[in-house]
Image (spheres, grey):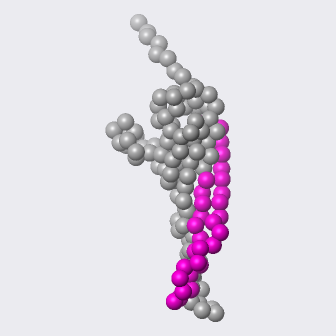
Amino acid sequence: MSLVNLLTIFSTTPAAEQVISFTVPVPGEVRAVPEYTWDFGDGIQGVGPGRPFTSSVLPSANPGYYTGATYSRPGMKHVTLTVTWRVTFRLEGVQDIPLDPIVMMASEDKQITTARAVLVN
């Protein structure tokens, strides 16, 4: 659950660039580089794998450090992470050949609610 008007932080474990080298029949490689895009619902989007929250880095003091959304209305939000692997095929002495990207998606629903202060004593 998250609260209206407070940053909801999202992150995933970043994947490393993948390289497969070969020498037969000719030297070359296949390289895959991940790109991350987020759809947080409500028309809010983000890029990159994000970072998990660390108490030593507060969002209010470090705007832009975290990947996330500040929702203005309560309700269920459908959040989708798309990881697109950009793949290139390279042979020695030949220009890089882009291959079809590999696209992976994961989604989850996030409940956004309001909170109210209660004065005591």
Residue 33: which quarter of the image? bottom right
Residue 52 appears at what percent x and percent y? 48, 46
Outermost residue to the top: 121
Does residue 91 show up magenta in the picture? yes
Q: Is residue 53 left or right of residue 21?
A: left
When the figure is inspected, residue 116 is found, relative to residue 46, above or below; the finding is above
The number of numbered discs placed on residues in the rendered structure image is 0
- State whether residue 52 appears in this view: no
Numbered range of the magenta stretch: 82-110
Residue 48 appears at what percent x and percent y? 50, 54
Residue 6 appears at what percent x and percent y? 47, 31
The residue at 58%/78% (across/down) is 97
Residue 55 appears at what percent x and percent y? 40, 40
Outermost residue to the left: 61
Instruction: Say which quadrant the N terminus sits in.
Output: top right
Outermost residue to the bottom: 25
Does residue 111 show up magenta in the picture? no
Q: Which residue is nearer to you in this view: 10 or 38? A: 38
The residue at 47%/49% (across/down) is 51
- State whether residue 70 appears in this view: yes
The residue at 41%/6% (across/down) is 121
The residue at 60%/50% (across/down) is 81
Residue 43: which quarter of the image? top right
When the figure is inspected, residue 10 is found, relative to residue 100, above or below; the finding is above
SS majority, magenta? strand
